C-alpha cells in the first residue's frame, strides 16, 4: 500500500495575463490531497472518496478496454474527482507498463473543491505517484507533472493549464510562461486564504477578458502591465530568498516581503479593471488589507472563489471569517514540498 499526497496552489501573480503569453507565478500551499493505493489481484478499480463530495462515495469498476468506468459516473462525481482518479489510474498503468493492474483507492483532501485552489490537480498528481509506486515504479516529479497534465487534458476535454499540475508535483513557487514551467526561488510566505463558497466560470471569464482586450487598448495594456508586475514580483522573490536565513528578521527582508504584498494589491486592481473580480472577492480583499495584510488579491479565474492575502500576523483569518461574503478562511504557508510519499 502506498499513500502519496500533493499540495494545492494559489496564484501569487499573473492569472489571466498568462493566457496571452505573460508569465505567472503560482505557489503551492500547505493544503493537500492524499491518495492511498493498494494493488488488487484482479483488474478492478475501487475508489472511495471520503471528502470529495458532501456524503462521500464508493465506486467500483473494471475497465478492460482502457475506457471510462463502466458505472454511471455523473457529472457531479466527475467534478468530485472520479474522472481525475480514472485518468490517473490510466497514467500509472501506462508508466508501469501494467495495463491490467487493479487498485483499491482512497482519496482524501483538505483543499476546498472548485475554489481555484488546484484540488483536482493535487488528486491527479498524488494518484499517479501512489499508483506508480505501488507498481514498483518511481517517477521524477517532472514526469508526474507531465502525466498529471495529460490526465487533466483528457478529463477537461483538451482544456488544461500546466500550472496547477506542475506546481502540485514540484511544490514551491513556479514560473509559468506558455508551456514552459519551472521552479523559482521563494522565501517563506505566510498566506491567508478566504473562500466565498462559490466559483466563477473560468471559460466565460477568460472569454470576457479576451473580448475586452479586443475592444479596448486599455485592456491589452492592462494585460501587459500584469506581466510587468509578475516580473517585479519574481525579482522580489529572488531578493527575499537571498535575504532570508541568518538575517531572517532583517529590515530589508521585511521591506521586500512588503513589496510583494504591494505588487499583489496592484495585480488585484488590474484584475478588477479586467472585470474578473466580484463583490465578495473585493470585500474579502479589503477586509484582509484592513486587518493588516501586506497585500491581497483574488486568485485564479475570479468571478467568485478565493482571495489570497500575504500576512505574517494573526489578524487576517479572523477578520475574514467575519466578512460578509466569506464562507471560510484559513491560514496556509507556501509549501516547498510537492508530491510526496506519506508514512
Ligand atoms: O481558477 P484556476 O486556478 O483554474 O486558474 C485560472 C487561471 C487563468 O489564467 C484565468 C486561466 C488559465 O488557463 O491560465
Image (spheres, helix red, strand yellow):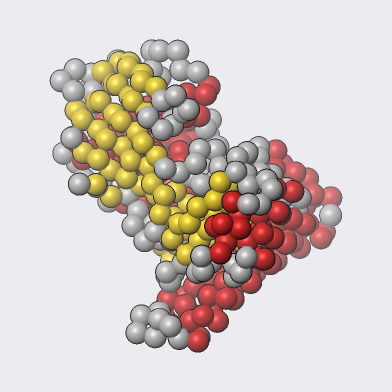
* Left or right of 219 in this view: 242: left
Residue 267 percent coordinates (x, y): 66, 63
Picture quarter containing residue 304?
A: top right
Residue 8 percent coordinates (x, y): 44, 48
Name the residue furthest top: 71
Residue 37 percent coordinates (x, y): 25, 33
Query: Relative to the observer, which residue lies in front, 214 or 223?
Result: 223
Residue 108 percent coordinates (x, y): 36, 36
Query: Relative to the observer, which residue lies in front, 151 or 328?
Result: 328
Q: Residue at x 70, y 38 (%)?
A: 204
Picture quarter containing residue 56?
A: top left
Figure check: 311 above or below 101: below
* Left or right of 49 in this view: 80: right
Q: Residue at x 51, y 69 (%)?
A: 313
Q: Is residue 57 visible?
A: yes
Q: Residue at x 74, y 55 (%)?
A: 272
Query: Relative to the observer, which residue lies in front, 171 or 321?
Result: 321
Q: Quadrant of the N terminus?
A: top left
Q: Is residue 97 visible?
A: no
Amino acid at each position: 500500500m502506498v499513500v502519496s499526497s500533493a499540495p494545492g496552489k494559489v496564484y501569487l501573480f499573473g492569472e489571466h495575463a498568462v493566457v496571452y503569453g505573460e508569465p505567472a507565478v503560482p505557489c503551492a500551499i500547505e493544503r493537500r490531497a492524499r491518495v492511498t493505493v493498494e494493488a488488487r489481484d484482479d483488474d478492478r478499480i475501487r475508489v472511495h472518496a471520503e471528502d470529495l463530495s458532501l456524503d462521500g462515495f464508493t465506486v467500483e469498476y473494471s475497465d478492460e478496454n482502457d475506457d471510462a468506468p463502466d458505472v454511471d459516473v455523473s457529472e457531479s462525481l466527475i467534478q468530485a474527482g472520479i474522472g481525475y482518479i480514472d485518468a490517473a489510474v490510466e497514467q500509472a498503468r501506462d508508466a508501469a507498463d501494467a495495463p491490467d493492474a487493479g487498485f483499491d483507492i482512497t482519496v482524501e483532501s483538505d483543499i476546498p473543491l472548485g475554489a481555484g485552489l488546484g484540488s483536482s490537480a493535487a488528486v491527479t498528481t498524488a494518484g499517479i505517484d501512489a499508483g506508480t509506486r505501488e507498481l514498483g515504479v518511481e517517477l521524477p516529479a517532472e514526469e508526474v507533472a507531465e502525466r498529471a497534465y495529460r490526465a487533466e487534458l483528457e478529463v477537461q476535454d483538451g482544456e488544461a493549464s500546466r500550472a496547477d499540475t506542475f506546481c502540485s508535483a514540484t511544490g514551491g513557487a513556479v514560473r509559468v510562461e506558455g508551456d514552459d514551467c519551472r521552479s523559482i526561488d521563494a522565501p517563506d510566505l505566510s498566506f491567508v486564504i478566504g473562500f466565498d463558497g462559490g466559483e466563477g466560470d473560468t471559460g466565460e471569464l477568460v472569454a470576457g477578458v479576451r473580448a475586452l482586450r479586443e475592444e479596448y487598448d486599455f485592456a491589452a495594456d492592462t494585460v501587459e502591465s500584469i506581466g510587468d508586475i509578475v516580473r517585479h514580483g519574481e525579482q522580489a522573490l529572488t531578493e527575499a530568498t537571498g535575504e532570508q536565513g541568518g538575517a531572517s528578521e532583517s529590515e530589508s527582508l521585511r521591506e521586500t516581503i512588503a513589496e510583494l504584498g504591494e505588487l499583489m494589491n496592484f495585480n488585484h486592481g488590474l484584475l478588477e479593471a479586467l472585470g474578473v473580480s466580484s463583490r465578495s472577492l473585493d470585500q474579502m480583499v479589503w477586509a484582509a488589507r484592513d486587518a493588516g495584510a501586506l497585500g491581497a488579491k483574488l486568485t485564479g479565474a475570479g468571478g467568485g472563489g478565493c482571495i489570497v492575502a500575504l500576512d505574517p500576523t494573526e489578524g487576517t483569518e479572523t477578520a475574514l471569517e467575519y466578512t460578509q461574503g466569506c464562507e471560510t478562511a484559513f491560514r496556509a504557508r507556501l509549501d516547498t514540498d510537492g508530491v510526496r510519499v506519506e508514512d
